[in-house]
Amino acid sequence: MNRRHVLRALSAAPLLAMHSGSAAERVALPRTGQMLLGIAEDWSSTRGKLYAFHRDPSGQWTASFSDDLSMLLGRGGLAWGRGAVPTPEGTRKREGDRKAPAGYFAIGKVYGYEASLPEGSDPRYPYRQVTKWDAWPDDPKNPYYNRHVVIDPSQGVPDWFDSQKMRLGDYAYHWMVEIKHNTDPQPVPGGGSAIFFHIMRRSGSASFGCTTMKQSDLERVLRWLRADANPHYVLLPRAEYERLKEAWDLPEI
């Protein structure tokens, strides 16, 4: 999908939809030309399927991949997160619950150990090569909670840094893609932090709340991301997907 088609598709994308539920309300939907749609069987699921879609020139969702990707989720299942679209009532994601946030989230910057994104990726997509001074605090009392921060060692290394740094050398974090949960307009302390797409561990164990997959699948996603498409991620249990599909203008699977 070229840049002209992406921009045309974004201009055709809907801005508003009626929210499902007993009390209908209008919610603003992000203008997005790419969507990763994650479906889990229910709220207790620790695994699911991931689908990639883009908008065609008429603004309709079209499958980007011919197949779905297998993913692992939080060990505690799912809970409603804090993202780009208001979510229904229910259990909310909180720090330390080991649940993956369900909802509608912007996809943020990519972080990794390499000097650049994989060959074939959009060179304009935001990327940061992680250094030994990068951190992402998950302590709700930290003033940088759920934010990327780079320490200047010449100004002194804070006591909290060692436990909050982005761990270099761990293959699971070779590539990390930010899922913008609990970020805007600013993080809510204790609302959950450091939610990423990253590489699945060899043990096949569920995560502490991130969405993980095989390295080859994650690199496939990295090559698919387009900076001008404003990509988003939707993660839902299947029943919630069926309930919110029309209101959130979600693709058919």
Image (spheres, rainbow, N blue to C red):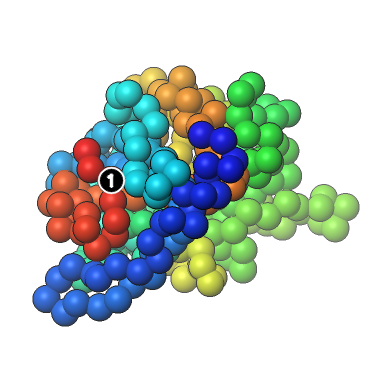
Residue for badge 1: 251
Q: Secondary structure at mark 1?
A: loop
Check the image and name the residue furthest to the front: 58
- Position of the C terminus, as image quadrant, is top left
Q: Nearer the viewer, residue 93 or 59?
A: 59
Q: Is residue 142 above or below residue 8?
A: below
Question: Quarter-wise, where is residue 181 in the image?
Answer: bottom left
Q: Residue at x 54, y 29 (%)?
A: 223
Q: Is residue 152 above or below residue 132?
A: below
Compared across the picture, whether 238 is left or right of 150 comes to: left
Q: Residue at x 35, y 69 (%)?
A: 16
Where is residue 28 drawn, in percent x and y? 38, 70
Where is residue 233 drawn, in percent x and y? 40, 48
Check the image and name the residue furthest to the right: 154
Compared across the picture, whether 231 is left or right of 69 comes to: right
Q: Nearer the viewer, residue 236 or 94?
A: 236
Where is residue 222 drawn, in percent x and y? 53, 32
Q: Decide if residue 18 is in sight here.
A: yes
Q: Nearer the viewer, residue 217 or 15?
A: 15
Q: Residue at x 45, y 44 (%)?
A: 57
Q: Decide if residue 229 is in sight here.
A: no
Tag count in the figure? Answer: 1
Q: 10 Å neighbourhood of mark 1: few (<14), some, or many (≥20)? A: many
Q: Amino acid at mark 1?
A: Pro
Where is residue 196 drawn, in percent x and y? 47, 44
